[in-house]
Amino acid sequence: MFPSDLESQIEQAVLLLKQGEAVAVPTETVYGLAARIDQTSSIEKIFRLKERPFFDPLIVHVSDYQSLEKVAESPSAAELSLMKAVWPGPCTFILKKKSSLDPLITSGLDTVGVRMPSHPVARAVLERLGVPFAAPSANKFGKTSPTKAQHVRGDWPNQEVFIVDGGDSEFGLESTVLQVFEESPTEVRVEILRPGVVTETMIRKVFADLSLAVQVIRKESSASPGHTPQHYMPTLPLVIVDPESGAFDSTMLQKISSQLGLSANGEPQFVLLQLNSDPRIAARELYEKLHTLSESKAHFILCPFAAEHRSEAEANLWVAIWDRLSRAASLIF
Ligand code: TXA
Ligand code: MG
């Protein structure tokens, strides 16, 4: 049961989705811009609203394993083991697509990204719609992802998009995107295309518990252009500095100022993006802080971020945070 206000928003969203509209729904990662997968005209609306290039494939969201069967070929034993460990939740699997699935969703690839969300509102919408929906993050292409309804409204201020307000997203970062390969009956290789809340450490543990040897690699896929180097950009330039390296002295500020092309007169004004030392909280707050700080009248956002957390060798949540932060940045020192 949902509070009556939320209940009526869910009903309205399901009605609009049935009619072929795109609507914004909360998920545990970020808000998604959803459209039913069985109508090309609905899927087109996502790309048009987001101003997203057609070469960037969408993630299909399913409520259960029966729905999964409709969009992708049956998962392998290894894929299923990992799914059972992380679904419903913030992990997207790249699977072989069913030939009946609209190629617009997958940008013509023969694979499809699928995720079973855990958010009760997203799940209610899926169950009542009775059809999976495709949903990228509910923001204009390249911009900061939304973790609350108000962020979505900011990108579409003229009521072009109906939004179900489900409060703040629990994790605040997009799902981990990965692909699982069975190398042999005892060996698994996992390629992480986008790091997220489901970390390398967690993935390793799932397979280790099954006595399978696992190799996890980070892969920059050209098929994952959500992964263009510049992405998640806030409207104010973001500058990242190593707090150990004299970040706030006037030489550094002058360097930032000239590299951002700010006028030489006067001290550049900045607002500070201070992340929590607990990575779960840092992840949850990151986009919210970027949205809020972007509204400031300063010249740029300055974020101290420790060099020790910038390594891809870390197998924890800092990897995902650094991935988003570095793509959102205009300058990194
Ligand atoms: O947490 C999330 O995943 C959110 C919520 C709404 O579920 N959705 C999301 O979607 O982040 P989007 O479109 O912003 O990011 C989807 C990512 C992109 O980087 C895309 O390139 C990649 O998934 N992707 C989708 N299908 C793929 C495929 N078949 N092969 C490789 N990458 C794929
Ligand atoms: Mg996105």
Image (tube, rainbow, N blue to C red):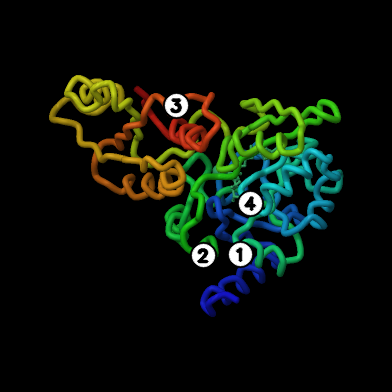
User: Neighbour class for label 3 at 10 Å: few (<14), some, many (≥20)?
Assistant: some
Label 1's element?
helix
Label 4 environment density (alpha carbons within 10 Å; few <14, some 14–19, many ≥20): many
Q: Is mark 3 within 8 Å of ligand 1?
A: no
Give the residue at the far left of this rendering. Answer: 266
Q: Image check: 116 left or right of 69?
A: left
Mark earlier in primary sequence (2, 4): 4
- Residue 7's place in the image compared with 61, above or below, is below
What's the distance in space between the residues labelled 3 and 4, CA to CA?
Answer: 25 Å
Residue 273, by quadrant, is top left
**Mark 3 = which residue?**
310
Q: Is residue 119 left or right of residue 327?
A: right
Occupied quadrant, residue 315: top right
Disc 4 and disc 1: Cα gap in Å?
11 Å
Quadrant, the C terminus? top left
Q: Which residue is mark 2?
A: 166
- Callout 4: CB less than 8 Å from ligand 1: no
Q: Give left or right: position of 305 versus 125.
A: left
Q: Give the residue at mark 1.
A: 120
Q: In the rendered structure, which disc, 1 or 3, sits on the residue that comes first in sequence?
A: 1
**Which residue in the protein does label 4 denote?**
89
